[in-house]
Amino acid sequence: MLKKLQLKKHAMTAISYMLPLVVAAGLLIAIGNLTGGQVITNFKSGYSIPSALTTLGVWGMGLLAPVISAAIAYSISDRPGIAPGLLSGIISYNIGAGFLGGMLGGFLTGWLVAFLVKYIKVPKWAEGLKPMMVIPLLSSLIMGVVMFFVIGQPIVWATNALTSFLNSMQGSARFVFGALLGGMASFDFGGPVNKVASLFADGLLLQGVKQPEAVKILASMVPPFGVTISWVLSKIFKHKIYSQEEEDNIKVAFPMGIVMITEGVIPIAAVDVIRMVVSCSLGAAVGGGLSMTWGIESPVPSGGLFIVPAMNKPLLFLLALLIGSVVTGLILFAWKKKPSEEPKKEEESEEDIDLGDIRIS
C-alpha cells in the first residue's frame, strides 16, 4: 500500500523544487547579517541594502512550507494541485504548523485533487473550466477546512512539543541527538537519508531551532574533508590507499565540500562502499554530537564554509568540523586497503603494411 502511494518519490520531487529556494534565501540572510542587516519591520522609514537582503531571505524561508506543499501536490496530481497546495502550505505556515504541516498538507491536497479529477463530472460545455476553476476551488475549500479545523492544531501541538523537547535536552542526550542527525546527514552522500535529515533540520529552523541546521551543514562537509585528510596522510606516510583515479576525484571533491556539496565523494565511495560509509558516518556523528553539545547554531540552511561567520559560535563549529573530519580521515587511513590497480596494457603496435606488395589480379 505504502509503495503504491510513492511517498518517497513525491517527497524527493518536492525537495528538488525547494532546495534552490533554501539556498538562495539562506545565503541572502547570511550576506545581509554579515553586512549589518536586520529584518525590516517598518518600511515607511529608511532601510539599507543589507537589511533588504536579510528581509528578503527571511521572507524566502517563510515560503518553504507553501513551496513544498505545492510541489508535493503537483507531483501527485499535476497542475491542478498547485493552487490548493500553495494555500495549504500558507495556512500551515501562518497557524504555526510549519514545515511538517506543509508536507502533510501537500500529500493530502495531491490525493484529494487526484480523486476529484477522476470522479468529478461536469457538463461538456464546462470541461474547460474543470481544471482551471472547479477542481482548484473545490480542493481549496476542502483543504482549507481540513487544515484550519482538523489537522492544523494537532500538528502545531506536535511541533511545539518537539521544539520544547529539543531545547530542553542536556548533556549526553544532546550529543546522541547530534550524532544521530550527523550520521544520517552523511550516510548516503546527498541521497534520500541525507534529504530526510536535511528536511528535519530545515523544518526545525522554521520553528526557531537552529542547532540541527549547524549539524546538517557540518555533516555534509565531513565526507569530502575526511577523505582528503586520509589522502594527505597516505602521502605523508607513503601508504597508498587510493588509485590514481580516486586521487583525481578527491581533488574535485574537496572544493565541492567547501560549499557543502557532498556528492563529490560518490565516485570515491563507489569503489569501497562499506568502508567509506562507515568512516564518514562515524566522523559526522562525532562532529554532529560535539556541535549539538556545544550549542552551535546556524541561522542559514546552506552555504558551507561561506556561512560560518553567520553562526553564533563559528570557531567551535570549525573545531567540531575538524574533529569529525580527522576521525573520518584516520579511520579511512587505517582501514582502507591498498588499491588493486589494473596493470596498463601495452599498446600493440600494428605491423606496417607495405601497400606495394598488394597485387590485384
Image (cartoon, rainbow, N blue to C red):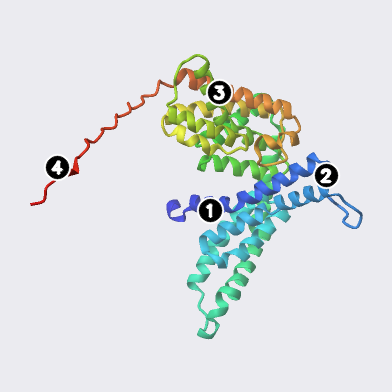
Residue at disc 3, secondary structure? helix
Q: Which of marks 4 and 3 is nearer the N terminus?
A: 3
Q: Mark 4 is on which residue type?
A: Asp
Residue at disc 4, secondary structure? helix
Of labels 3 and 2, the one closer to you: 3
Q: Residues within 10 Å of mark 2 (few under 14, many from 20)?
A: many
Of labels 1 and 3, the one closer to you: 3
Q: Where is residue 217 in the image (x, y as percent from the top left)?
A: 63, 36
Question: Which label is found at residue 229?
Answer: 3
Vertical placement of 265 versus 339: above or below? below
Q: Residue pushed farthest bottom?
A: 125
Q: Earlier in the sequence, mark 1 or mark 2?
A: 1
Q: Residues within 10 Å of mark 4 (few under 14, many from 20)?
A: few
Residue pointed to by mark 4: 357
Please report contact status of discs 4 and 2: CB closer than 8 Å, yes or no. Answer: no
Q: Mark 3 is on which residue type?
A: Ile
Q: Earlier in the sequence, mark 4 or mark 2?
A: 2
Question: Which label is found at residue 112?
Answer: none
Please report contact status of discs 1 and 3: CB closer than 8 Å, yes or no. Answer: no
Which of the pair 24/153 is nearer the observer? 24
Which of the pair 87/115 is nearer the observer? 87
Q: How crowded is mark 1: few (under 14 residues within 10 Å), some or many (20 or more)?
A: some
Residue pointed to by mark 2: 37
Q: Residue pushed farthest right?
A: 45
Q: Distance between the residues labelled 4 and 3?
A: 61 Å
Q: Earlier in the sequence, mark 1 or mark 4?
A: 1
